[in-house]
Image (tube, rainbow, N blue to C red):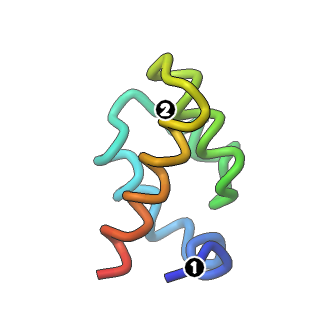
Amino acid sequence: MNWDQIEGNWKQLRGKAQQQWGHLTNDDLDVVEGRRDQLVGKVQERYGVAKEEAERQVDDWMKSISG
């Protein structure tokens, strides 16, 4: 699955994102709307991690939902 597919299916995938990052609120996920850069920023903000770590987590999550 690539980011275009994630963006297109965000309504279905946002629950999986919330399972992965429980500190993300519904408002956070509304703002993200499937955009990778926004998700990285929200993970950074809510978990207090460096950008590189947030990007790694998001990439790992994408791989995990791709199957």
Residue lying at the far top of the rendered structure:
48
Relative to 5, residue 33 above or below: above
Residue denoted by label 1? 2
Q: Position of residue 11 (x, y in %)?
A: 53, 66
Q: Which residue is drawn at the image coordinates 35% and 58% (left, top)?
A: 16
Q: Which residue is drawn at the image coordinates 34% and 72% (left, top)?
A: 65
Describe the element under mark 1 as helix, strand or loop.
Answer: loop
At label 1, counting other C-alpha atoms closer than 10 Å, the crowd grade (few under 14, some 14-19, many 20 or more) is: few
Q: How many marks?
A: 2
Relative to 67, residue 16 above or below: above
Q: Is residue 38 left or right of residue 28?
A: right
Disc 2 marks a residue whose amino acid type is Thr
**Snapshot quadrant of residue 7:** bottom right
The label number, if any, that marks residue 25 in the structure image: 2
**30 and 43: which is toward the camera:** 43
Q: Position of residue 26 (x, y in %)?
A: 51, 39
Q: Which residue is drawn at the image coordinates 48% and 36% (left, top)?
A: 53
**Snapshot quadrant of residue 52:** top right
Residue lying at the far front of the rendered structure:
52
